[in-house]
Amino acid sequence: MTKKIVALAGDGIGPEIMAAGLQVLAATAEKIGFDYQVEEKPFGGAGIDAVGHPLPADTLAAAKEADAILLAAIGGPQYDLAPVRPEQGLLAIRKELELYANIRPVKIFETLAHLSPLKAERIAGVDFVMVRELTGGIYFGDHILEEDKARDINDYSAEEIERIVRQAFEIASRRRKLVTSIDKQNVLATSKLWRQVAEQVAKDYPDVTLEHQLVDSAAMLMITKPSHFDVLVTENLFGDILSDEASVLPGTLGVMPSASHSANGPSLYEPIHGSAPDIAGQGIANPVSMILSVAMMLRESFGREEGAERIEQAVDAAFKEGVLTADLGGRASTQEMTEAIIKNL
Ligand code: NAD
Ligand code: IPM
Ligand code: MN
């Protein structure tokens, strides 16, 4: 059966890296016999420009019908003062599709280890997965801005906590079997509930260890001993901040993919970085974050492990040949990087 993939290129470097991701998908599909069609739709700033909305109705309808969604990046300075922002489209699609589980793997490519701001001995062996709650918490509570005061509401139900913590345990049970749950239970009520629910879920996974970390010390540990972590799980805002922190460990945002899952609808795959307006239009963006998102899609939405592995190994091989974009200290263009990966598939 032909799989339907909706592609949302978005803004800034989005269209450049989406084109790269789709080229690699096409080349991989040919090798492994994967039958698919791609529908490209406006989203983010491109949606605002096209129809005045960052998540056009037609784009949302196509996404809901899709077998999987690829998203590149949205946003840009030209929308900073606009009444409606591209970011609202991103939050809306996550909420509409109930993409509550955001999975952000962090691992170090051996060839790129020297790019890490951390010392070699600290970065050795880093391989963990950030599991971020994506459809609740302070992001989706009321935001009340008055003239001289403001309020943002952080809300979590036990059910919302349970399903994301369960995802973390499922992932950990296939890995090193350590879940680090991150909260701020010395201050926040939502965190107290979070910790209780995590303890409950842990009972169903006797061979997985659960530990708790306060978010401030977890931020420290991520620099002082990042190899300690296996699977981290945390609420929306903490997960946003910690995953950008985690993303500096490999030395660039440009190699970091992610997956977002719901209970039974289509999943969405996107780089964790933004639209990089500072380098957009120059053909020098690193496409690897998008290309590895395509690999995650093949594995997690379509069960095509072989395709995912071919892509991941081809990326590694291209790096080893010294084909590197500017953020990796090289001179390769987006297209040259993409071609080197395709050649190594
Ligand atoms: P950013 O992630 O776009 O860029 C941060 C830095 O990393 C920049 O110097 C950029 O050039 C570099 N970078 C990012 N991706 C790269 C790549 N693939 N190759 C090479 N270099 C890369 O963050 P920002 O500048 O704070 O945000 C820009 C816009 O993106 C904002 O409008 C923000 O809201 C939006 N944003 C969108 C998403 C998303 O689409 N999921 C995520 C984060 C930020
Ligand atoms: C991300 C981004 C988004 C977030 C922004 C653009 C709304 O930073 O995907 O991490 O905060 O979730
Ligand atoms: Mn973020």
Image (cartoon, helix red, strand yellow):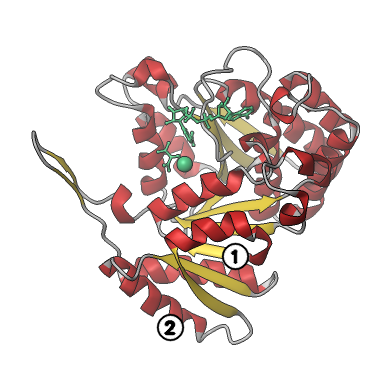
Quarter containing the C terminus: top right
Q: Position of residue 233 (x, y in %)?
A: 50, 63
Q: Which residue is the extreme one toward the left?
A: 147
* Residue that badge 1 annotates: 231
* Residue that badge 2 annotates: 200
Please report the residue visible at 65 percent of the width from the left and 36 percent of the height from the top: 252
Q: State if disc 2 and disc 1 touch (CB < 8 Å).
A: no
CA distance for labels 1 and 2: 17 Å
Q: Which residue is the extreme one toward the top?
A: 282
How many numbered discs, if any? 2
Query: Relative to residue 108, is residue 35 depicted above or below?
Result: above
Question: Which of the two discs, 1 and 2, labels the residue nearer the N terminus?
Answer: 2
- Rendered image: mark on residue 70: none
Q: Position of residue 201 (x, y in %)?
A: 47, 80
> Badge 2: few (under 14), some or many (20 or more) residues near its Cα, within 10 Å?
few
SS under mark 1: strand
Please report the residue visible at 60 percent of the width from the left and 40 percent of the height from the top: 4
In the image, taking residue 337 as reference, residue 168 lies left or right, namely: left
**What is the three-letter code of the residue carrying label 2?**
Gln
Please report the residue visible at 34 percent of the width from the left and 34 percent of the height from the top: 88
Q: Is residue 266 visible?
A: no
Front-most of residues 295 and 78: 78
Front-most of residues 205 and 46: 205
Q: Quadrant of residue 183?
A: bottom left
Q: Quadrant of residue 186?
A: bottom left
Q: Is residue 196 visible?
A: yes
SS under mark 2: helix
In the image, taking residue 229 as reference, residue 332 lies left or right, namely: right
In the image, taking residue 72 as reference, residue 55 lies left or right, namely: left
In the image, taking residue 140 as reference, residue 286 lies left or right, namely: right
**What is the three-letter code of the residue carrying label 1?**
Val
Front-most of residues 341 and 277: 277
